Structure formats: structure tokens, C-alpha cells
Amino acid sequence: MALIFSNSNRFLFNNQHVLRSVLILSVRYKQRGHIADHLVESQRQSPLGKAKAGAGVGVFPPKDDKNLNLKTTPHDFKYVYPDFLPNPIPFLRDRILEKLERKDMFRRRQQIDIPEFYVGSVLAVTSADPYSPNRRNRFVGICIQRERHGLKHQFTLRNIVDGLGVEIVYELYNPTITKIEVLKLERRLDENLAYLRDAPPEYCTFPFDMEPVKLPPGSGVPLNTIQVPITSTHWQYKWERHDLKGVLLPSLPRSVRKAAQRYSEPWRQWDIMRQYRTEIHDDDRAEIYEDIEKHKEDLTQYRIDSKENVKITRMRQKSSGRKAISDDAQKPKHPTSQ
């Protein structure tokens, strides 16, 4: 008796090796978070070309201040330079690639000044746009998110333009970006401000001709402890299930509150292994911070050399012009033939 195969069964029968590989990849993807502790420890204790002892002693800034009642917070390394921090998942790291990307990031920072900003700061980004009238596009908005690592680091700006919410995702090291200005430097209580999409428009509306707010020199980063009310009837996410400190939720039904309690995970703040897996080892942070400090010194020397080169070229141009004028004055005038 001949077997009758449909089109779908024939495809499955002819591509069993493809399905087997897809199944193996899916299982490995689900098991990404389940790694033996000794493998994690051996991976983190092997910095490339660096001694294990002495790298993380007194070379990186102090840890972030957890007191949210303060009006200012210190300039912490992991918030000032989040783009330099590698992926905390051990088997997704490539230390050689990280070093090469870091060199490219330093080279890009020599061409453009990338200021210090945080989630909650108001920025103005000028980028090259061939379809704009003056070939330049300037967008002003509040930074609601910073994500990804290394050269792929990106941030999102949000603003209300003509009554519509506009969000633009910029890659921090995109060569089309010509200027990044910090109009208002501050931090918020949360590291992700996606809930502003469901908040009233006045909390994320900024004029395009906004003047920069200057801070006194040597002051800390202002911490804005404002709580944004959620007034939208259709929320983008279930914000009551997230541990958000800068959100003022309306009165919710009892069933919704019970579901939020059921999905909440209050034990995560005492989960030491989760904190260990999501943070970078102190030796790696110290190595990255040393590279950044060395780059700062090289950058200052590069700017001094560039200014001196500009002065030398200008002096050469002036001296060459004066020499040409003197040569013309000393050249004998030939009498005209009669």
C-alpha cells in the first residue's frame, strides 16, 4: 500500500536534519540562563592579557549611592559609560572583539564630543539627513531608554510634536551624528521611562528652541524624584507588574492587584546570584576604566597637537604670502619696448 503524503508532511520528511538543528538551537536558547557556577567563575576570572591580582584595587569610582532621598547622585562609572560595559552573559562575550570595538569607540570620540547623559536627560541630537532642506536634522527630546553594548549602543529620544508622540532611536556611534547637546542633565528613579508613552503629554513635551540648563561646576547629577501619573485607558504594558518607582498608578480593580501580587518577585532584591550574573566583574570594570582614563589623556594631547598644527599651518601660510609679496617687490621691472 503506497503512502500518501501531503505537502506539509513531505516537507517535514525531506528536511528532518533542518528541524533537528532548529530544535537543538531552541533548547539551547531556553537553557541560556542555566549555566554551571564553576563555568561562570572560570570565565570571569580569565581577563585577556591581564594579571588576576591588582587590577581592581582603587582604580574605579565608588559604587552608586542607593539613597533615593538625595537630590544629587555621584557620577558613577556604569551610568556615565554604559556603552563600554560588555555583555554580562559570559558565553556571549568575546574579549578580543571587545578590545577592538573599544579602539573604534575611542577613535569615534576623537571626531565628536559625546557628553555625559542619563535616562531622563533632555538632549538635542543633530544628524546628517540628505532629505532635509539644509542637510541637517535636529531633534530635541527626553532620553527614555539606553540599551545594547559596545559599538551597537543606542538611546531613544521622545518628544510630542504637533500632538503626536515621536520617538527616534539613535546609535551612539553612528557616523551620521554630527553633534549631541545636553540641554538638561538629570536622572530619574527608573532606568527605563517607557511608561511616558501612557503618561500625559506635558511630561515629555519640549520646545525645539529650548535653552540649556547650566549646572554649577563640581555639582552632582540632579535626581528628579517626580512620579508620573498614568492616565491612558489602554496601557502599552501592565505597569503594575513592574517595580517602578517613578509611576503613580490609578486605582485598580481587586483582581488586577491580586494578579500583580501573584506575578511580583520581591525576593529578587536578595538574590545574590542573579546580581552576580547581571553585573561585570570588578577586574573587567577596572581594566575598562583604565583604558578610558588613558584615552582621556590621549584625547587632550591630540587636541593640543591639533591646535599647534593649525597654528603652524597658519604661520606658514602667512610667511609664504609675505615672501611672495617681497619677491614681487624685489623683481626688477622690465622697460617697455618703444
Image (cartoon, rainbow, N blue to C red):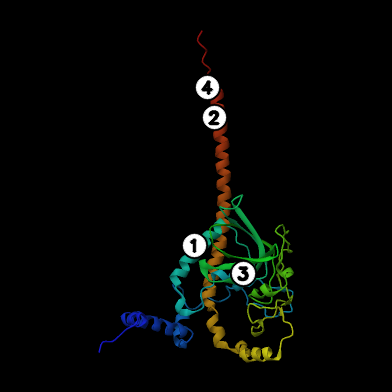
Name which residue type carries label 1. Asp
Q: Quadrant of residue 182?
A: bottom right
Distance between the alpha carbons at the discs numbered 2 and 3: 53 Å
For label 1, the residue is 104
Label 2's element?
helix
CA neighbours of label 3 inside 10 A, class few (<14), some (14 to 19), many (20+):
some
Q: Residue 97, how many percent across, how many down?
A: 45, 69
* Mark linked to residue 211: none
- Which disc is residue 324 wearing? 2
Would you name the residue on which mark 4 appears?
331
Q: Sequence order check: which comes first, mark 2 or mark 3?
A: 3
Q: Secondary structure at mark 4?
A: loop
Relative horizontal placement of residue 75, taking residue 332 as reference (left or right) = right
Mark found first going from the N terminus, 4 or 3: 3
Q: Where residue 214 sits: x, y (%)?
A: 73, 62
Q: Which residue is mark 3?
A: 80
The amino acid type, in three-letter code, at marker 3 is Val
Residue 241 visible: yes
**Type of amino acid at the residue the image marks with label 4:** Lys
Q: Is residue 6 left or right of residue 33?
A: left
Residues under numbered marks 2 and 4 in contact, where contact means CB atoms less than 8 Å apart: no
Measured Cα–Cα span from mark 2 to mark 4? 11 Å
Dot 2 amino acid type: Ala
Q: Is residue 244 above or below residue 80?
A: below
User: Distance of mark 4 from mark 3, alpha carbons?
Assistant: 63 Å
**Mark 3 element type:** helix
Q: For the residue labelled by badge 1, is the local secondary structure a helix, a strand or a loop?
A: helix
